[in-house]
Image (cartoon, rainbow, N blue to C red):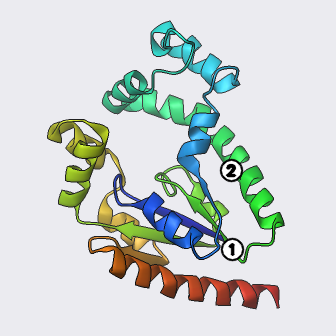
Amino acid sequence: MIIGVTGGIASGKSTVARAFEALGVPWVDADDVAREVVEPGEPALAEIAAHFGQRMLREDGTLDRRALRELVFTDPAERKWLEATTHPRIRQRLMAHLERLQAKGAPYVLLVSPLLFESGQHVMADRCLVIDVPESLQIARTAARDEVDETQARAIVAAQMPRDERLARADDVIDNGGGETSLAAQVAKLDRLYRELAHARRH
């Protein structure tokens, strides 16, 4: 069984994934896979350089992620092109990672993806878990973590799927606006549910 985990930027997706991992549940991070597919030598990186020019590459041949992010955030057409180039490759590689984890006998696995719904990756999941935090907290965390100003942090949040739409598409929700104790309790409760569902599927 695959549980898709998503949430807006700085909602704490990795923190939640690590809490599940402590209970013996493995996970794949779509962000890590997204970085893998644009490493030097990968076809997607060659296509990006051909499309946007060499200015998108650093001196060592790696992708200048910040320059690319700034460009696609201001140009929806270029963002669509980039997604069409990278998303199918990301999905293919995610499936390979998930199948490898499933083969190791985990009760269920997590697919952690900030663009679970937007990229269509939710179709790979049996259930979708949304990590929810107030937008003001997202903006503050993003500005601090990514070293961007509040205006840019707001633009990043605004570019994502609206919070109410994400919540409407969730099978399960974790409220990550509280402390560690609250988070651990919510994770433990969902872990029990997911194990029961996975068990019922197998029998």
Q: How many marks?
A: 2
Residue identified by numbered label 2: 94
Q: Residue at x 66, y 61 (%)?
A: 124
In the image, 148: left or right of 190?
left
Which amino acid does the dot numbered 1 rest on?
Answer: Tyr
Give the mark, 2 or 1, whose residue is nearer the N terminus.
2
Q: Using the image, determine if residue 13 lies above or below residue 167.
A: above
Front residue of 38 and 165: 38
Which residue was labeled with disc 1?
108
Residue at the (26%, 56%) spot, across then down: 138
Asked which quadrant contains residue 33, the reply is: top right
Q: Position of residue 187 (x, y in %)?
A: 48, 79
Crowdedness of circle 2 by 10 Å Cα count: few (<14), some, many (20+)?
many
Relative to 59, is 128 above or below? below
Q: Residue at x 58, y 39 (%)?
A: 34
Percent position of residue 146, x then y: 31, 39
Horizontal side, residue 56 vs residue 74: left or right:
right
